[in-house]
């Protein structure tokens, strides 16, 4: 089958890793800056064990985001982000349906899928920890 673009899974992984890493850092850094406010916010949204879950979300988003950007331990980083997004879907977004404009699962589901894809595929060649298939 003829392709418009050449097949380049390493470039594709780089793009997805960098974009997801930036998104996670963007959402995680405010949690670092005000963990107490994040805990309060989680409590207000009815998230169980808000101190623990807010701390996990902070670590997953900032730590996972940095690891994804660098392309290091991407299986761990991807799983952390996927678990974080699964929690967001279950405890915050599911009650709002699917559409992102209604606060639904659409956005965190897309991030979860990106994270799992990276966790399964590896970082690709353009990463500090190069690799893909074992």
Image: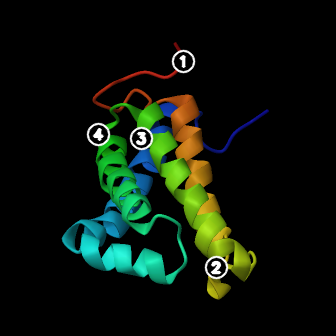
Q: Quadrant of the N terminus?
A: top right
Q: Name the residue that disc number 3 marks.
A: 77
Q: Residue furthest bottom?
A: 102
Residue 134's x, y, as percent? 52, 12
Q: Identify the residue at image location x=52%, y=35%.
A: 119
Residue 85's x, y, as percent? 55, 58
Q: Name the residue that disc number 2 marks.
A: 100
Residue 115's x, y, as percent? 53, 47
Label 4 SS: helix
- Badge 3, how many Cα within 10 Å: few under 14, some, many 20+? many
Q: Identify the residue at image location x=72%, y=78%.
A: 95
Disc 3 versus disc 2: nearer the observer? 3
State the CA–CA distance, disc 1 to disc 2: 34 Å
Q: Name the residue that disc number 1 marks.
A: 133
State the CA–CA distance, disc 4 to disc 2: 29 Å
Q: Earlier in the sequence, mark 3 or mark 1?
A: 3
Q: Earlier in the sequence, mark 4 or mark 2?
A: 4
Q: In the figure, is residue 117 to the left or right of 13?
A: right
- Badge 1, how many Cα within 10 Å: few under 14, some, many 20+? few
The reply to whether residue 126 is in sight is yes
Disc 1 versus disc 2: nearer the observer? 2
Question: 51 or 126: which is nearer to us?
Answer: 51
Q: In the figure, is residue 106 to the left or right of 66?
A: right
């Amino acid at each position: 089958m003829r392709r418009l673009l050449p097949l380049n899974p390493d470039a594709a992984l780089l793009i997805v890793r960098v974009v997801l890493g930036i998104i996670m850092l963007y959402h995680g850094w405010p949690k670092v800056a005000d963990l107490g406010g994040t805990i309060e916010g989680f409590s207000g949204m009815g998230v169980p064990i808000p101190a623990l879950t807010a701390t996990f979300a902070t670590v997953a988003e900032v730590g996972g985001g940095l690891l994804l950007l660098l392309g290091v331990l991407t299986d761990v980083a991807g799983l952390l982000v996927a678990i974080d997004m699964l929690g967001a879907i279950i405890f915050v977004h599911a009650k709002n349906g699917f559409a992102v404009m209604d606060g639904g699962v659409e956005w965190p589901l897309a991030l979860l899928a990106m994270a799992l894809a990276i966790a399964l595929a590896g970082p690709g060649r353009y990463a500090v920890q190069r690799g893909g298939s074992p």
